[in-house]
Image: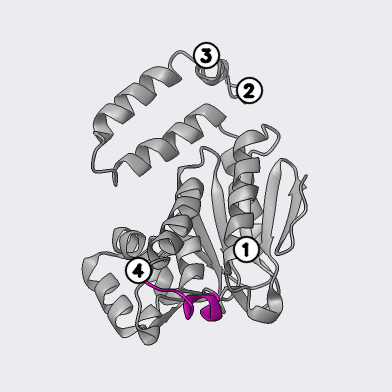
Amino acid sequence: MATYENLLLHIQDNILTITINREDKLNALNIETVKEIRNAIQQVYDDPSIRGVIFVGAGPKAFVAGADISEIAELSDVNARSFAERGQEVFSMIERCNKPVIAAVNGFALGGGCELAMACHIRVASNNARFGQPEVNLGVIPGYGGTQRLTQLIGKGKAMELMMTGDMVSAQEALELGLVNHVTSQEELMPKCFEIMQKILSKAPLAIGLVIECVNAVYTKDEDGYQTEANSFARCCTSQDFIEGTSAFLEKRKPVFTGK
């Protein structure tokens, strides 16, 4: 497995943990780190032994506390669009990945960190986590998909408020808003993420990937989500996992899925 300057990768039981490893910078996303995340996610796409991914930040304070402000300060109208589009491309790769991706939000998830968490399929937060899109304090707006995903997750009114005020919300408020799926203690965060991931990985891999595709289709303007669902359902019914799953149910035993 490739090594990175700003990421730590560890695989256990077919689950890849990607740690954003810039603790002295509260794991802020600089351009190089975003590139490395792209390469790591490409490995996930390419390596069949990796069946799920968990993102977490190094240290006890931050998941990712934003982008690298020194780099943002240097942006001009010439390169700002490409800066945003590169980040959007990487986060879209995470969102579209046909393997489950969980964000273990272990502290501040601000700006690009909140955007990274929202690109993941499931978010679990420790009780010290804080979420926000405070970009207006710098005279800019979210650029890595935050205006779109935050609105999808918590609704237009509250998303407008958070992005226009720059306010942070606690882990508990994020849970109430639907921004996160679960809140745990700091000690239980990673065990909870592994528990959820292991439950998902006990199911049919093809079906899991198609669930992700169909749910994403809800938010794709040029795609008929119902047709995507019907096509995906039909595809499942031609798979060996479908035969195994239905046979196991009728025979009152646990299925053994192969992803075929």
Q: Is residue 143 above or below residue 215?
A: below
- Residue under pointer 4: 177
Secondary structure at numbered mark 2: loop
Residue shown at 45%/49% (left/top)?
Answer: 92
Looking at the picture, the colour scheme in use is: one colour
- The residue lying toward the viewer, choosing from 197 and 92, is 92
Q: Earlier in the sequence, mark 4 or mark 1?
A: 1
Q: Quadrant of residue 137?
A: bottom left
Work out how far the residue at label 4 is from the one at label 3, CA to CA, in angstroms. Answer: 39 Å
Q: Which residues are magenta?
A: 68-77
Q: Which mark is residue 258?
A: 2
Q: Is residue 205 above or below residue 137?
A: above
**Quadrant in which the N terminus is drawn:** top right
Q: Earlier in the sequence, mark 2 or mark 4?
A: 4
- Amino acid identity at mark 2: Thr
Secondary structure at numbered mark 3: helix
Q: Earlier in the sequence, mark 2 or mark 3?
A: 3
Work out how far the residue at label 2 is from the one at label 3, CA to CA, in angstroms. Answer: 11 Å
- Residue under pointer 3: 243
- Residue under pointer 1: 32
Residue shown at 25%/31% (left/top)?
Answer: 226
